[in-house]
């Protein structure tokens, strides 16, 4: 973590936004296929547009040291060069003594003309001799919509040992008891079994729940019913066990949990993630609702989601999977309206 040289601020001025001229990031090399895209003539443009769609469309502010997860593996912002003005300077700047926080500052903001410079960490996420450990949050059809001909499946899963830790089995059992998640989990598990039957993957259930861990889980479940704030403790136990399994096996961790990915990166565990179908459907539905007032039919939503996924990730979603997620979102909407 960087050290900071702080400057006392008596009167905080109005924040100025400074346009970012260019920024440098480094990302783990997610696969041989993707790296060929990165180093091609179209690579910079691809990453530029991908960053805009997945990160900076939601939050255009960026600082050195920011940890981004727009790709299948983490990226770190190394340097941000802004168009300085008399009114503002970057909020932080590197010095030999750490990072200096200015008393007159502006926040760097990504704009259309911002240029991106991408470097790659040398990390063999595509080395299929390393197992792939699955987190609970990737095991429902909303986060696991890809088929055996998917670029993601071919790059990261095909021919590999896929490990489901015992604590994940515990979590899945709980999910199967919840009506709105049951169908999504069952479909994801059936698809994994289909891959195993076709010898596309080697599926392994790993580890055991010790009596102590199982007891802690039960106690936490009881505590949650009385005090929902204790939910974080349960998550900490689960995340720790999954991460320890990945460390023990020298595996790659497949999780969509950003905090867990940051911790894994700090501990030297390579990670991958997948922009879930649920997120894609939600993004498209939200955009359509903002831009239109007339009724939009399910058939059009399905087409928009499929076009988006194909353009951004090269993925081909199934109509029935998108329909399932749309049904889930409708259930959530009814639940919110009934509160």
Image (spheres, grey):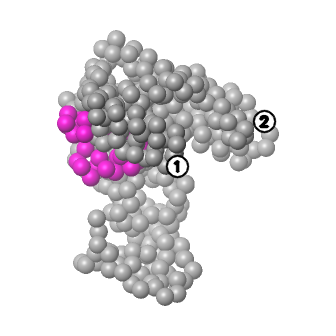
* Residue 299 visible in the current orientation: yes
Q: Which residue is mark 1?
A: 53
Mark 2 residue element: loop
Question: Is 54 one of the magenta-colored residues?
Answer: no
Residue found 25% across the figure and 39% down from its top:
244
Instruction: Name the foreground residue: 228 vs 274.
Output: 228
x, y percentage for residue 180? 58, 28
x, y percentage for residue 189? 43, 20
Front disc: 1 or 2: 2
Instruction: Name the foreground residue: 329 vs 287.
Output: 329
**Mark closest to the chain's N terminus, 1 or 2:** 1
Q: Which residue is mark 2?
A: 295
Residue 231's place in the image compared with 138, above or below, is below
Question: Is 254 one of the magenta-colored residues?
Answer: yes
Mark 1 residue element: helix
How packed mark 2 is, by other alpha carbons closer than 10 Å (few <14, some 14-19, many 20 or more), is few
Residue 281's place in the image compared with 258, above or below, is above
Real-space Cα distance between discs 1 and 2? Answer: 25 Å
The image quarter containing residue 306 is top right
x, y percentage for residue 79? 35, 66
User: Residue 329 got which mark?
Assistant: none
* Residue 40 visible in the current orientation: no
How packed mark 1 is, by other alpha carbons closer than 10 Å (few <14, some 14-19, many 20 or more), is few
Residue found 58% across the figure and 25% down from its top:
179
1 with respect to 218 (left or right): left
User: Magenta stretch?
Assistant: 244-269
Q: Image quadrant for the C terminus?
A: top right
The image quarter containing residue 103 is bottom left
x, y percentage for residue 325? 59, 29
Residue farthest along the bottom direction in this orientation: 10
């Amino acid at each position: 973590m960087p050290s900071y040289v702080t400057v006392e601020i008596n009167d905080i001025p109005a924040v100025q936004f400074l346009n970012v001229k260019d920024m440098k990031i480094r990302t783990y090399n997610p696969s041989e296929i993707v790296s060929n895209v990165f180093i091609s003539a179209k690579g910079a443009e691809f990453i530029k547009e991908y960053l805009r769609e997945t990160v900076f469309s939601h939050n255009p502010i960026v600082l050195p040291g920011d940890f981004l997860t727009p790709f299948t593996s983490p990226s770190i912002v190394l340097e941000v060069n802004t168009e300085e003005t008399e009114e503002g300077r970057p909020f932080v700047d590197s010095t030999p003594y750490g990072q200096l926080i200015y008393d007159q500052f502006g926040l760097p903001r990504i704009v259309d003309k911002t240029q991106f410079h991408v470097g790659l960490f040398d990390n063999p996420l595509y080395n299929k001799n390393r197992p792939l450990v699955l987190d609970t949050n990737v095991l429902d059809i909303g986060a696991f919509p890809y088929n055996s001909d998917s670029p993601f499946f071919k790059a990261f899963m095909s021919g590999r040992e896929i490990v489901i830790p015992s604590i994940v089995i515990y979590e899945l059992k709980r999910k199967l008891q919840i009506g709105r998640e049951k169908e999504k989990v069952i479909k994801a598990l059936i698809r994994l079994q289909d891959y195993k039957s076709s010898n596309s993957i080697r599926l392994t259930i790993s580890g055991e729940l010790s009596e102590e861990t199982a007891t802690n889980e039960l106690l936490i479940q009881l505590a949650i019913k009385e005090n929902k704030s204790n939910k974080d403790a349960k998550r900490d136990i689960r995340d720790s066990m999954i991460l320890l399994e990945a460390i023990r096996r020298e595996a790659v961790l497949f999780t969509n949990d950003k905090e867990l990915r940051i911790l894994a990166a700090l501990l030297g565990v390579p990670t991958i993630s997948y922009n879930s179908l649920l997120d894609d459907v939600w993004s498209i539905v939200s955009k359509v609702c903002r831009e239109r007032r007339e009724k939009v039919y399910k058939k059009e939503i399905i087409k928009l989601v499929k076009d988006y996924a194909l353009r951004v990730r090269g993925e081909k979603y199934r109509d029935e999977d998108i329909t399932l997620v749309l049904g889930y979102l409708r259930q959530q909407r009814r639940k919110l309206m009934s509160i």
